Image (cartoon, rainbow, N blue to C red):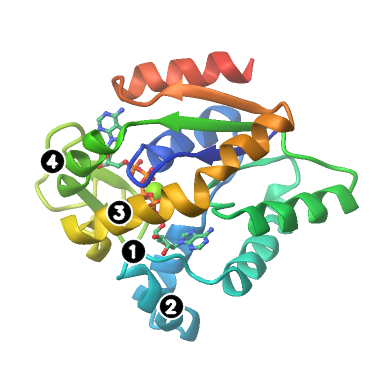
Amino acid sequence: MKIIMLGAPGAGKGTQAKMIAEKYEIPHVSTGDIFRANIKNGTQLGMEAKQYMDQGLLVPDELTVKILLDRVAKEDCKNGYVLDGFPRTIPQAEVLDKALSELGDKIDYAINVDVPDENIVRRMGGRRACLSCGATYHIEHVPPKTEGICDSCGQELVLRDDDKPETVQNRLNVYHEQTQPLIEFYSKKGVLQTVDGTMDMNDVFEAIVTALS
Ligand code: AP5
Ligand code: MG
């Protein structure tokens, strides 16, 4: 099963993608996590991506597409995957489409996690992220067992550089301009499923599982 997660920054794509990956035993592929791991390791790619990410802008398609296509060509993606944060522009979606159709393949579902902008800004300030393993917490909704420490790998949790309120607003603007058109793109292909992302995260997950069955 090949699944795409759509939704504004902070809508809960990463949270839900992790749960989907576990239930359906497919890899969770997040371009944001790949960039953040590269920034943490000080790679050339990380340094380039950081300039855009810190401003809430998209990393250019040329950099992003190659990374994603390399990742989904790996053996563990053979039986499917859940893409989180990709595609984010129409050109990215077209490249993915073309690469898949050359293999006689296609995306099965695009899940749109729908959350209004007002809720987003409130959520982001409370998010804490682990830059080592990609786990995400929320100081109120999903606190870690020990404050500031990742439950899964024991590393320190941080407020992401791009979760400052000014940057969140930029990311929302970029989302509406460049990413939201993908909702229509996948709707036309007949694979779009929209779920209400303002519910409790377990209820959101239940709605997704229903949509996938
Ligand atoms: P990326 O890492 O993809 O960030 P994003 O899309 O902005 O989304 P987030 O990770 O912020 O939010 P999310 O929807 O995953 O929400 P989460 O589950 O964490 O990208 C970062 C940057 O990288 C981009 O700005 C861009 O520069 C670059 N980039 C990445 N991919 C790219 C691409 N394809 N092309 C170009 N550039 C790219 O949830 C948010 C918070 O809410 C958490 O604290 C969570 O615990 C909490 N929460 C989740 N669900 C609920 C719920 N139901 N109720 C209450 N709280 C909840
Ligand atoms: Mg995410």
Marks 2 and 1, how far apart at CA: 15 Å
Marks 1 and 3, how far apart at CA: 27 Å
Q: Is 180 or 150 nearer to us in this picture?
A: 180
Q: Which residue is mark 2?
A: 46
- From what the image shows, is residue 21 above or below residue 172? above
Q: Earlier in the sequence, mark 4 or mark 2?
A: 2
Secondary structure of the residue carrying tag 2 is helix
Q: Which residue is mark 4?
A: 139
Q: Which mark is residue 56?
A: 1
Marks 4 and 2, how far apart at CA: 27 Å
* Three-letter residue code for mark 3: Cys
Q: Earlier in the sequence, mark 2 or mark 1?
A: 2
Q: Is residue 191 left or right of residue 88?
A: right
* Three-letter residue code for mark 2: Gly
Marks 3 and 4, how far apart at CA: 18 Å
Residue drawn at x 39%, y 43% as measured from the top left: 8
Q: Nearer the viewer, mark 2 or mark 1?
A: 1
- From what the image shows, is residue 158 above or below residue 49? above
Q: Which residue is mark 3?
A: 153
**Labelled pair 2, 1 in contact (Cβ < 8 Å):** no
